[in-house]
Image (cartoon, rainbow, N blue to C red):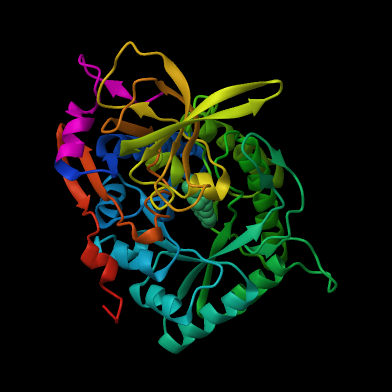
Amino acid sequence: PAGVVRNDDGEVTVHGITASALAAEYGTPLYVVDEDDFRSRAAAFRDAFNAAFADLAGGVDVYYAGKAFLTVDVARWVTEEGLRLDTCSGGELAVARRAGVPAANLSLHGNNKSVAEIGTALTMGLGRIVVDSLDELERVGSVAEDLGVDANVMLRLTPGVHASTHEFIATAHEDQKFGLSMVADGDGASPAERAVAFALGHPRVNLLGVHAHIGSQIFEASGFAVAARKLLAFAAAVEAEHGVAMPEMDLGGGYGIAYTETDTPRPPAELADAMAAVVRETVAELGIACPRISIEPGRAISGPAGFTLYEAGVQKTVAVESGESTLPRRYVSVDGGMSDNARPVLYEADYTAVRANRVTDSDAIISRVVGKHCESGDIVVRDVYLPEDVAAGDLLAVPATGAYCWALSSNYNYLARPAVVAVRGGASRLMVRRETEDDLLARDMGA
Ligand code: LLP
């Protein structure tokens, strides 16, 4: 698979460090993050979008979506690479703060931010709070009044674009929890329009612009283009009605990555150029100035930069009925599973795996990599060809686990969370230590 590099002995390596050296030093399961790769993906988004929008909006602000994978180091990396940071909870804000990210570079998302989270954001002087509903806008306004500070607000709208993996379906897509509807209701105005009127009329709310996030793991630019057109038309209508040009517009995240060879992501430059072309054409048609654009990629920056190393354990082979005949399927159990990668269970997500510590001339047979949890759905890789001579003690590497794996990890069955290791320029270092038995019992008041 893409990104898997082997040395002359057939061992998987990252910048010259072998998988077996990493496993020996840090143990398994282990999340390995290629810091150079992470940084270059961040830089690629920064450069591609700044180039594509240079003549339009004077460039683009790229916010890394921390929900995909965030530690204090990661917050520093993105800041050093010239990106901003999108957070979605008080906890993520605390990480950003610990990393010393300037408050002006931070945004806060969430459909049900607490008064405390809003208060923290306003006291810090956050660059923007992305407001999800009228209720919340009122809440932000009143907290800002109480604190005697101004709130910089983006309004998250639902432009009626439902994005799926390869296509987008232009449905209303009203029926989900996020965002302000753009559809007029009984009173002839939409919740989005009402929110704009409220924001413009509020002495402590500074309305920066509108935002849309259409989905995740998207390959085509067309869904983003539809959202951009709708948001720009909305901004033009606001300008016509209120005489106010909103200075910013955010097109969200959702850029897809390759988990297996059937996934076909586009390079950031191709997406950026396609999006810039649509924005250029639309602002000309509408006769408005182009707002400053921002985007929020998460998965596309951290996902491909990480992989998980497991140690293989026991195996069994079963006969699977397939039409008239039966076929063997081998199960290979590893020392982690759904607690370190919930995505196969949650989304039926597909991954692949390779044996990382050696190559032999053994035939590849169809195999299912499973975890060690007490659930039959605890699958790491549904179907993958692995060498027939894979044995207990071999290392398996699962690529593209850098996004939404550590972030979604749990202690199910009292498994300790794996360590996270960064590799940069030929050296490895611990980013997050492995949990211990004491960690597992630390909050149990009966212990
Ligand atoms: N901006 C907003 C407002 C979002 O809600 C999200 C993701 C992003 C940006 C970043 O999207 P990305 O570029 O990473 O696709 N746990 C799921 C993904 C949930 C995405 C939630 N929102 C998964 O593992 O596939």
Q: Position of residue 34 (x, y in %)?
A: 27, 37
Inspect the magenta stretch and tell me whether residue 21 lies in it.
yes
Please tell me which residue is depicted at 60% across the width and 33% down the height of the picture: 220
Using the rendered view, name the quadrant where residue 39 is placed. Answer: top left
**Who is closer to the viewer here, 293 or 14?**
14
What residue occupies the far top of the structure in this picture?
361
**Who is closer to the viewer here, 242 or 386?**
386
**Who is closer to the viewer here, 405 or 254?**
405
Q: Position of residue 54 (x, y in %)?
A: 46, 38
Q: Is residue 103 visible?
A: yes
Please tell me which residue is depicted at 21% across the width and 44% down the height of the picture: 27
Please tell me which residue is depicted at 33% across the width and 44% down the height of the picture: 335
Q: Position of residue 63 (x, y in %)?
A: 42, 51
Inspect the magenta stretch and tell me whether residue 106 lies in it.
no
Start and end of the magenta stretch? 1-24
Q: Quadrant of the C terminus?
A: bottom left
Q: Position of residue 430 (x, y in %)?
A: 18, 48
68 is higher (above) or lower (below) than 191: above
In the image: residue 311, left or right of residue 236: left
Please tell me which residue is depicted at 77% across the width and 48% down the height of the picture: 171
Q: Quadrant of the N terminus?
A: top left
Q: Is residue 248 visible?
A: no
